[in-house]
Image (cartoon, rainbow, N blue to C red):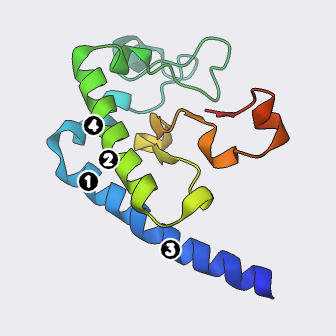
Amino acid sequence: EQTDLFFVRVLENAFLPLFTMSMFIQELPEFHDLDLMVGDRCNPASDPLNCTESTSAPPLAGKETTHRDLSGLFNTTEGRIIQRKFDTIASSIKENSGLGKALVNIQLAPKGVVSMLYPMVNCEDFVGNPRVEEGYCMNN
């Protein structure tokens, strides 16, 4: 029962930082078009015409059914600005959330596609774990 109460408190506390991130994303103009940039999933087998003319992020080669290739979105000047802004906000929220190691990362997933996450590599939350001492970290 103590474990149940612990998780209830952690999840209740997690709501506020994630809600805060959501509000930043909705209010800052840099993030307004991310869902349009990611676009709807395109299936060339069932809809070849729309896939040919689609501006959506294409499937990732070798993982077509589960992953999208977002490199074209974030390997641009605008994309790098958006990523830096996200990292700054997410870093501050993670640091000041009061959740400590319980908040491992913050993710942004327009159209259900994980597009940004902070931190990309997380060793700090796992200090003392023998695997981290061997060079293993949470690598997103």
Callout 4 secondary element: helix
Report how far apart the C-alphas of labels 2 and 3 lie in the structure: 18 Å
Residue 15 drawn above or below residue 6? above
Q: Residues within 10 Å of mark 3 (few under 14, many from 20)?
A: some
CA distance for labels 4 and 2: 6 Å
For marks 1 and 3, give the CA distance: 18 Å
Q: Could you classify mark 4 by the number of other residues whose Cα lies within 10 Å: few (under 14), some (14-19), or many (20 or more)?
A: some
Q: Are marks 4 and 2 in contact (CB under 8 Å)?
A: yes
Check disc 4 and give the amino acid type.
Lys
Foreground label between 1 and 3: 3
Q: Position of residue 106 (x, y in %)?
A: 48, 48
Residue 33: x and y, percent? Answer: 24, 36
Q: Amino acid at mark 1?
A: Phe
Residue 103 position within the rendered picture, expressed as x and y whole percent measured from the top left: 56, 57
Task: For marks 1 and 4, give the CA distance.
Answer: 10 Å
Find the distance from the CA under tag 3 to the CA under tag 4. Answer: 24 Å
Q: Residue furthest left?
A: 29
Question: Which numbered disc, 2 or 1, marks the residue that appears first in the sequence?
Answer: 1
Q: Which mark is residue 89?
A: 2
Q: Amino acid at mark 3?
A: Asn
Q: Is residue 37 left or right of residue 95?
A: left
Crowdedness near tag 1: few (<14), some (14–19) or many (≥20) residues, C-alpha within 10 Å: some
Q: Residue at x 70, y 33 (%)?
A: 137
- Horizontally, residue 3 falls left or right of residue 68, namely right
Give yes or no for contact between labels 2 and 1 (Cβ–Cβ under 8 Å): yes
The answer to whether marks 1 and 4 mark residues whose Cβ atoms lie closer than 8 Å is: no
Residue position marked by numbered label 3 in the rendering = 13
> Which one is earlier in the sequence, the residue at label 1 or at label 3?
3
Q: Nearer the observer, disc 1 or disc 4? A: 4
Label for residue 85?
4
